[in-house]
Image (cartoon, rainbow, N blue to C red):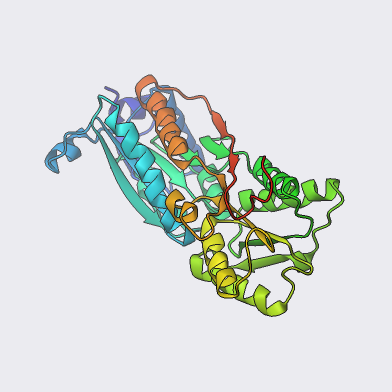
Amino acid sequence: MVGIKDIAKKAGVSFSTVSIILNGRAEERKISPGTQKKVMDAVKELQYRPNISAKSLKEGRNSSFVIALFWSFDFRKAMASRFLSGLQDKKKNLKDNIDIIVYPYQSGQLYKEKSLLQGNKYHAAIIANASQEDLEYLESINTLVPIVLYNRFSDKYSSVNLDDRRIGEAAAEHLMEQGYKKPFLITSAVNFPGASLRRKAFCERLKKSGIQITEQNIMFGDDSVGGGAECGRMLVESGRIGQSIDSIFCASDALGIGLCYELNQARIRMPEELGVLAIGNGEPQYSQFCTPSISVINIPMEQMSATCYELLEKKIKQGHDKVERVLFETIVLPRESTKKHKI
């Protein structure tokens, strides 16, 4: 076992200096960046891992590994159940006894989570829903525990991602295959790099086939069932459905469900008068048993969750230090809301 004394000797600093740095108090105690780097280089070279076994035993836990899941509980809170379900299924097939601790955090304020610097509460961490500010913070720090990012790219940390460009292209292709020529886009008011890329790829793929998407054909709303209903209400009142709009691509199935509610209230027939396609990032059964059932681009969240753990396991057990990127493909699940023609 490598201890703090070994790190101090390797870095040529005092025991207390190492302790301060490893407890995330270097800035507070005004320890120079150069000294911090020497200590963290020694940590990496000696493959030091904080010993949290005593803490686990004191709390009555007997865990081989403790995994932290950092999740931003904003509009994405409904997706957390699917992600945790994937981790739970993974646990069932493992010999190791794993604890999963959920750390809710506010988007853009990951810097407040000091446990990332201290490394004495868990063996590894999965960070989901990181904003650009959160990613910049992660790039600026040295963590004592392995980290894997969910659906965010980084040159410093391993990650499990979706092919966001392909999602946008697949949405455009599906609507065109079903004969729709006047698409509309409803997307979230909260932006992140993946969402921007999906939107851009959707518009570019349509443009290649001679279909132009203008700003008048893009609507931003709250990413929720209520937000989708509000967007639907405004579109119905505008009178554009059936005239300049024959299909709608929603950035989430929550938006799609709310949209379909308003369309049903207005007695607009789907898919005949209007096709609806959504990104399936929520509970699959809700879009499947909606009226009509909503065509979705399936997000394999449970498999992505399990892969996040697999990457962490390699880092914990094998000291694997390579930055890996796993990219998941997505498929369209055609249902009643767009299925005018057989595919």
* 265 left or right, relative to 197: left
Residue 54 visible in the snapshot:
yes
Q: Looking at the image, is 30 positioned above or below residue 273?
A: above
Q: In x, y percent, where is residue 188?
A: 60, 62
In the image, farthest residue toward the bottom: 237
Q: In x, y percent, where is residue 265?
A: 55, 74
Q: Looking at the image, is 45 positioned above or below residue 154?
A: above
Residue 20 picture quarter: top left
Residue 328 picture quarter: top right
Q: Quadrant of the C terminus?
A: top right
Q: Looking at the image, is 1 positioned above or below residue 238?
A: above
Q: In x, y percent, where is residue 230?
A: 57, 74
Between residue 331 and residue 12, name the one nearer to us: 331
* 27 left or right, relative to 50: right
Between residue 27 and residue 329, name the one nearer to us: 329
Between residue 195 and residue 54, name the one nearer to us: 195
In the image, farthest residue toward the right: 210
Q: Looking at the image, is 146 positioned above or below residue 77?
A: above
- Which residue is at 80% across, 63% downward? 214
Q: Quadrant of the N terminus?
A: top left
- Which residue is at 50% across, 65% downward? 224
Q: In x, y percent, where is residue 141?
A: 49, 43
Residue 42 visible in the snapshot:
no
